[in-house]
Amino acid sequence: MEGFVYLTEEDLIKAAKFLNQTPEEFEKLYVYRTRHQRRLRKPRGSQCGFLTETGCSIHPAKPTQCRLFPWWPHLLESRKEWEKTAKWCPGIGQGELVQIGEAHERAEEMKTAYPNFF
Ligand code: SF4
């Protein structure tokens, strides 16, 4: 997946704990921090460094935006964006049916977790 993976402070702490690191160690190795946000370090256009052949290597502690994908506000609000995303994400349209109310609750969680983006 292209694009950046943003973390909340809680995401950073949780992922560090999962890898048996301190938040400071994790941040030094994997996080790029600006004044308003934190994201996983990766060269533009490359895959996330935690992606392996068998999936996400930090799955139980993956960042909020990964956990809530594809229930992101701009995807729920635009059919065109949803269909565009479904073209590259093989998981969309698969799995359990999610009720629209629940989808919107997840989108709200995204807005709360990343207030600078929405
Ligand atoms: S789910 Fe895991 S591998 Fe995928 S972008 Fe998020 S942290 Fe990276």
Image: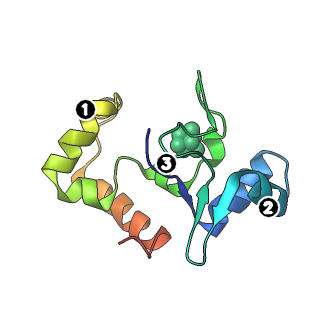
Name the residue: 84% across, 57% down: 25
Q: Amino acid at mark 1?
A: Lys
> In this figure, which residue is indicated by the disc labeled 3?
66
Horizontal and vertical percent for residue 17?
79, 53
**Which is nearer the N-term, disc 2 or disc 3?**
2
Name the residue: 31% across, 32% down: 88
**Which is nearer the N-term, disc 1 or disc 3?**
3
Position of 52 with respect to 118 (left or right) is right
106 and 22: which is toward the camera: 22
Task: Provide the secondary structure element on which disc 3 rests.
Answer: helix
In which quadrant of the rendered view does residue 117 lie? bottom left
Name the residue: 77% across, 51% down: 29
Horizontal and vertical percent for residue 90?
34, 27
Task: Provide the secondary structure element on which disc 2 rests.
Answer: helix
Q: Amino acid at mark 3?
A: Cys
**Which is nearer the N-term, disc 1 or disc 2?**
2
User: Does the Cβ of the disc 3 residue fall within 8 Å of ligand 1?
Assistant: yes
Position of 81 with respect to 116 (left or right) is left
Q: Which mark is residue 87?
A: 1
Circle 1 residues within 10 Å: few <14, some 14–19, many ≥20: few
Horizontal and vertical percent for residue 59?
61, 39
Vertical comparison of 22 with 91: above or below: below
> In this figure, which residue is indicated by the disc labeled 2?
23
Circle 2 residues within 10 Å: few <14, some 14–19, many ≥20: some
| Distance between the alpha carbons at the discs numbered 1 and 2 | 36 Å
| Distance between the alpha carbons at the discs numbered 1 and 3 | 18 Å
Q: Amino acid at mark 2?
A: Pro
Is residue 93 in view? no
